[in-house]
Image (tube, helix red, strand yellow):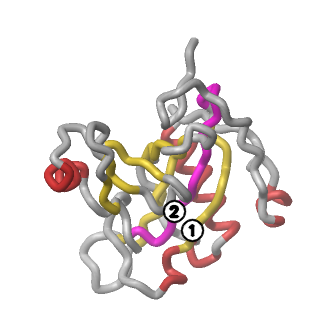
Amino acid sequence: MHVTSGGGSSCSFPQPIPSLPPRLRSLGGFDQPQDPSDTLGLQGFAAQAASAVAPGLIGTVAGEPVRVHSLDPTRPDALVVPLQSSQQGLQRPIVAGLVALLVDCAGRAYYSAVDDLTLRGASAPQSFPSVSVSDAASSLGATRPQLVYSRSPFAPRWRNPDSGLTIAAFSA
């Protein structure tokens, strides 16, 4: 089987080794790989990790994991699980936090980080990514834009694979 990274070349990055916060280390199990095809398992894993690391995210509901491809062939692709919260006065849930898992060459997902968006004080988006694929396609003139990251899966961009043009996909 020929495994490829987000950059489209042979998989050349080492297995992600989670750098766990003390709270996750004491709970145990967060250094173990997760099955990316087990959506419910990933959602439970993400909600538990977020609650342990960022108390402000207790009670949030994990959404569908979103695949974000790495532009750097030496870095793994990621799965980002949005954590939604209902705030009083809002009719729709907002994205209160994000949990990133890095995907190794064998397709296993490992805990990477939690981003508590409630600490930023900015208005929270209603989805991750906040720019829809159809809006990205229209803006980029692409039929199938790719969701990619260069430095952090928490700051993805939509990319036209033909021209290489990008636009921000998420802002919080």
In percent of width and height, residue 148 lies at 42, 48
Q: Position of residue 78 (x, y in %)?
A: 54, 45
Separation of disc 1 and disc 2 at Cα?
5 Å
10 Å crowding of disc 1: few (<14), some (14-19), many (20+) = some
Which of the 4 quarters of the picture holds residue 1? top right
* Residue annotated with mark 2: 98
Q: Nearer the viewer, residue 9 or 138?
A: 9
Q: Is residue 117 above or below residue 138?
A: below
Residue 30, given in percent of the width and then of the height, sits at: 74, 49
Name the one closer to the observer, 69 or 132: 69
**Residue beneath disc 1:** 115
- Look at 83% across and 57% down and name the residue there: 25
Q: Residue at x 70, y 37 (%)?
A: 33
- Give the residue drawn at x 63%, y 39%: 74
What is the span of residues highlighted in magenta in the rendered image?
Answer: 95-107
Is residue 99 shown in magenta?
yes
Task: Give how far across and how far down residue 76 sits, in percent.
Answer: 60, 41
Determine the residue located farthest toward the front in the rendered image: 163
What's the residue at 56%, 37% (across, down)?
73
